Image (tube, rainbow, N blue to C red):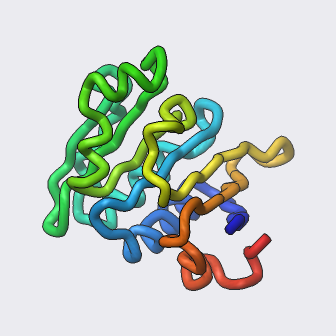
Amino acid sequence: MKYIYNSSSELDTINFAKNLASKLVSKDVIVLSGELGSGKTKFVQGILTYFGLEDEISSPTFNIVNEYTSDKFPIYHFDVYRLEDVVEFYEIGGEDYFENGLCLIEWGEIIEEALPSDFIHICFEKKSDDDNSRILNIQTYGKKFDKFFDDVLGKDNLE
């Protein structure tokens, strides 16, 4: 399924992510794409805030993955931008994380072949006429997330 969410501000993106986080469970995978400064980190901030980890966020740019411990399950925030290819992801045991917690993966298209069959892909796009607004193009893969966004977004955002 494809959905579109129009975010009018950083706070709007954070609140959207918090609302989405309320439906997420261990083993869910979300891939985040978009140019630098498009809102990926604000989205992650919203997810972490929902789980009471708002003071923990840091970019995993140098570590590849940051691990957070929530009361419900581990949360893994990946930035795979610096990986050469999917082989490097396998070498660090990246696919093992999919079975152990919630995975948020920036630049996940680099490791597309390693992704599980069920995942959410959100592509962040800056609006050319408004520095604060973003378009979030959301695509779900696999059957697990069919109708997943109907409650989060409402049927008006169904493409």
Q: How many marks?
A: 0
Residue at 48 percent of width and 63 percent of height: 17
Residue 58, given in percent of the width and then of the height, sits at: 31, 37
Between 99 and 134, which is closer to the camera in this rendering?
99
> In the image, is 20 to the left or to the right of 64?
right
Q: Which residue is pictured at 48% across the width and 60% down the height?
A: 118
Residue 88 figure quarter: top left
**Quarter in which the N terminus is drawn:** bottom right
Which residue shows up at 66% across the image and 83% down it?
Answer: 154
Q: For this view, does 122 lie left or right of residue 15? A: right
Q: Tell me what residue is drawn at x 54 percent, y 71 percent.
A: 143
Residue lying at the far right of the rendered structure: 129
Q: Position of residue 37 (x, y in %)?
A: 59, 35
Left or right: 34, with 41 as reference point: right
In the displayed image of the protein, which residue is found farthest to the top? 84
Pick whichever, 138 or 114, lies toward us: 114
| Residue placed most toward the observer, 115 or 79 | 115
Q: Position of residue 53 (x, y in %)?
A: 23, 56
The quarter in which the C terminus is drawn is bottom right
| Location of residue 59 (image quadrant) | top left
